[in-house]
């Protein structure tokens, strides 16, 4: 099984990186800036990363709370729509890809050229006072669309910021938001830990970076220093059509502190736990809708922090993960016996992302991320199989900053090494180099 | 003829040169003054704000509406109603100080945190206190008034008395006598005979407050805030200060009456309902001796 997993892993990794790169859906919405007449920098350190004011705006249901939030105040010709795309040149390299034409021998594959990112069509705002929404039809770079986000939210229920209810498909309430990540290359455009599964593990449901279908109850203090949310989610990784009948829960809470001249620091914790299917019933060889069975459990938990030292800030994230052994060994829980030595895989990981925000028009970024397996799904696996080291560096320059549109010249390099993940049992390394014009309007 | 024409050209050129140099010299003076004013400080509690530290914050958060030079002519000002504050004249609506005087730094601090209801000015509550005091210092640096004048002495607000039926009736009589109805309407619906003619002191149309809208007052939502608005006025708008026209106790009566006009449930509203209070009749004679008319309203 390990050899099987290894054989296809490089391909999966490549495909995964490309897919994630294409499907990234970062939320930076000039439509909001146009509505309120605020520059992008009012809500973003540099877009798309939110600052404390932007986080509060989001938590208030895209409202400034100045009695001008209802759409009745807008000119009827105002449309809350933003489009974002990134024409770019990029170079992708994977060091060990098994090639059929070479008799399965591994070769380095490097591709480079001009390309497009996916397209995000972001529509969001208020339907009425204290009723907000977000709808994001999003395409990959071939133009194939899906719904990245689609939700409505009742805000400030009982006239309290502590009670807000959202339903639909939404980003989990990650304060360190992958949807607002400042790095966008194929390897650096996501947090490894938000999607990590061990080698050979088939749990596609535990990704806290994926938008999920469900309902979220959340709230915050007036100044947003204290915030919480509890989400109940269908365990289908955001896929529509009721593919499974299982649920999972995401809970997070955080507290921010004013640290004088340094800024606002925040610490928090999260738990993502639930059950998800391990196989699907078929009819005539075709999966039956709603026929997902064999639920097994998984959980991810950890802590995070945002720390500011004036223009320098650090995002710190830690995760401990656990998957049931059926997930770990990709065994359907339909009576199929587990392979010898099967055990529930566990891992620990973290990242530190640093930003130096020169001003709202220039930011330097680095991220170092590590994942370490603490228990392999099979006792016979090498102990470090699937460990990840990922490093990303980049900068974004915004030649102008106003309330109508956004543009960033983006330059980034990212490298990801996964231990022993190549078919040969050697390390698998992927790297991305990217120059892009990232714009939205 | 040709010589005269040439002479005229030279004279015109000279005048143009003079005007250009004068303008340049004036601009240099302005820049010099601004540099001087960048030393401006603000003080709120134990915190001291510095204009130099506030410059980047102003650019990040405020410049779109209030403009590069603080004149309220930011790139979005043309789309905004009411218009953003012009900091160069240092005139502020929400103050604890008498009309015509500069506000306290604390007043500006409160305004930034609270925002201004029914305008595009949001609540900047999430900003740190340090950021706010630095912003205040930078806002002050736009006007030389802050170097030549001191803020006014805050008005005193006596403790809020118990609301009674008599007080609400007195408040209603005051509403009529002070001619509040001329702008705010006989029922407080912002439809008085003068409502459509009102302008701020930059000759821009402005609407009176509608007490039946379920919105907050511009300068706070408590009874004390409403009291303060009567006594300080909203400088730069047609809403005057009544500090010279009514006694503190009467101001509280007016507060209670206006609360009874608002749609939300309140003790004042319940009492007014019990009383069967009807909208004022501007043409009805005053119940007791003719009341003195205020000089301003």
Image (cartoon, rainbow, N blue to C red):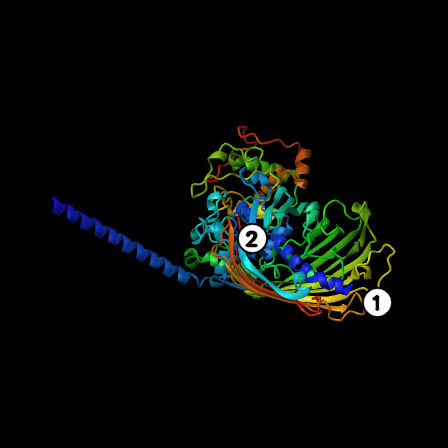
Residue placed under numbered mark 1 in the picture: A341
Q: Chain of mark 1?
A: A
Disc 1 vs disc 2: Cβ atoms closer than 8 Å?
no
Asked whether residue A102 is in view, the answer is yes
Of residues B106 and B135, the one drawn nearer to the viewer in this rendering: B135
Of residues A316 and A93, the one drawn nearer to the viewer in this rendering: A93
Q: Is residue A315 above or below residue B260?
A: below
Q: Position of residue A103 (x, y in %)?
A: 68, 64
Q: Chain of mark 2?
A: A
Residue placed under numbered mark 2 in the picture: A116
* Disc on res. A298: none
Question: Mark 1 and mark 2: span between their CA atoms?
Answer: 45 Å
Q: Position of residue A305 (x, y in %)?
A: 66, 64
A415 sits left or right of A372 in the view: left
The residue tagged with tag 2: helix, strand or loop?
A: loop
Q: Earlier in the sequence, mark 1 or mark 2?
A: 2
The residue tagged with tag 1: helix, strand or loop?
A: loop
Pointer 2: residues within 10 angstroms few (<14), some, or many (20+)?
Answer: some
Q: Position of residue A186 (x, y in %)?
A: 61, 59
């Amino acid at each position: 099984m390990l050899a099987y997993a290894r054989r296809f892993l490089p391909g999966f990794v490549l495909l995964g990186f490309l897919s994630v790169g294409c499907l990234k859906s970062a939320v930076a919405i000039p439509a909001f800036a146009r509505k309120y007449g605020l520059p992008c920098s009012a809500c973003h350190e540099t877009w798309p990363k939110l600052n404390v004011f932007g986080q509060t705006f989001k938590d208030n249901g895209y409202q400034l709370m100045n009695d001008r939030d209802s759409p009745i105040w807008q000119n009827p010709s105002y449309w809350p729509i933003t489009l974002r795309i990134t024409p770019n040149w990029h170079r992708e390299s994977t060091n060990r890809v098994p090639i059929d034409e070479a008799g399965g021998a591994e070769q380095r594959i490097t591709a480079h050229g001009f390309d497009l990112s996916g397209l995000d069509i972001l529509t969001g705002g208020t339907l009425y006072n204290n009723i907000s929404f977000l709808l994001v039809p999003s395409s990959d770079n071939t133009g194939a669309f899906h719904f990245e986000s689609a939700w409505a939210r009742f805000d400030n229920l009982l006239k309290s910021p502590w009670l807000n209810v959202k339903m639909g498909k939404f980003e989990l309430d990650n304060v360190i938001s992958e949807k607002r990540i400042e790095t966008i290359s194929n390897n650096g455009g996501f947090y490894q830990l938000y999607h990590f599964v061990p080698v050979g593990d088939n749990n596609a449901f535990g990704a806290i970076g994926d938008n999920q279908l469900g309902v979220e109850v959340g709230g915050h203090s007036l100044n947003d220093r204290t915030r919480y949310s509890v989400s109940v989610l269908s365990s289908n990784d955001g896929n529509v059509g009721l593919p499974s009948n299982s649920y999972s829960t995401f809970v997070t809470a955080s507290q921010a502190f004013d640290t004088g001249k340094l800024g606002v620091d925040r610490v928090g914790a999260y738990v993502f736990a639930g059950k998800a299917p391990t196989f699907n019933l078929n009819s005539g060889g075709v999966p039956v809708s709603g026929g997902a069975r064999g639920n097994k459990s998984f959980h991810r938990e950890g802590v995070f922090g945002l720390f500011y030292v004036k223009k320098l800030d650090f995002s710190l994230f830690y995760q401990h993960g656990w998957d049931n052994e059926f997930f770990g060994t990709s065994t359907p829980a339909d009576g199929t016996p587990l392979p010898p030595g099967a055990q529930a895989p566990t891992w620990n990981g973290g990242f530190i992302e640093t930003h130096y925000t020169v001003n709202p028009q220039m930011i330097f970024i680095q991220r170092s991320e590590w994942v370490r397996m603490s228990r392999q799904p099979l006792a016979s696996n090498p102990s470090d199989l699937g460990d990840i080291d990922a490093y990303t560096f980049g900068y974004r320059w915004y030649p102008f900053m106003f309330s109508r549109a956004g543009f960033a010249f983006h330059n980034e390099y990212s490298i990801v090494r996964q231990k022993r993940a190549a078919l040969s049992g050697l390390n698998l390394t992927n790297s991305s180099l990217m120059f892009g014009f990232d714009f939205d309007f | 003829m040709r010589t005269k024409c040439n002479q005229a050209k030279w004279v015109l050129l000279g005048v143009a040169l003079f005007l250009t140099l004068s303008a340049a010299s004036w601009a240099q003076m302005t820049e010099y003054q601004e540099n001087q004013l960048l030393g401006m400080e603000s003080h709120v509690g134990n915190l001291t704000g510095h204009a130099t530290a506030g410059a980047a914050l102003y650019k990040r958060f405020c410049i779109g509406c209030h403009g590069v030079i603080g004149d309220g002519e930011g790139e979005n000002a043309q789309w905004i109603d009411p218009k953003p504050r012009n900091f160069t004249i240092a005139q502020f609506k929400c103050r604890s100080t008498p009309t015509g005087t500069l506000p306290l730094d604390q007043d500006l601090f409160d305004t930034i945190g609270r925002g201004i209801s029914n305008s595009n000015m949001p609540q900047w509550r999430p900003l740190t206190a340090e950021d706010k005091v630095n912003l205040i210092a930078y806002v002050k640096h736009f006007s030389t008034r802050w170097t030549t004048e001191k803020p006014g002495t805050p008005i005193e607000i006596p403790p809020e008395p118990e609301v009674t039926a008599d007080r609400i009736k007195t408040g209603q009589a005051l509403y009529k006598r002070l001619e509040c109805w001329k702008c705010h309407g006989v029922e407080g619906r912002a439809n008085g005979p003068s409502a459509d003619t009102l302008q701020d002191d930059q000759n821009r149309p402005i609407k009176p407050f509608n007490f039946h809208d379920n919105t907050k007052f511009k300068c706070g939502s408590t009874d004390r805030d409403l009291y303060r608005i009567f006594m300080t006025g909203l400088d730069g708008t047609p809403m005057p200060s009544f500090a010279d026209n009514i006694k503190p106790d009467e101001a509280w009566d007016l507060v209670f009456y206006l609360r009874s006009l608002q749609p939300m449930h309140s003790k004042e509203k319940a009492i007014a309902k019990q009383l069967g209070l009807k909208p004022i009749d501007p043409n009805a004679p005053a119940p007791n001796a003719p009341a003195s008319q205020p000089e301003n309203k």
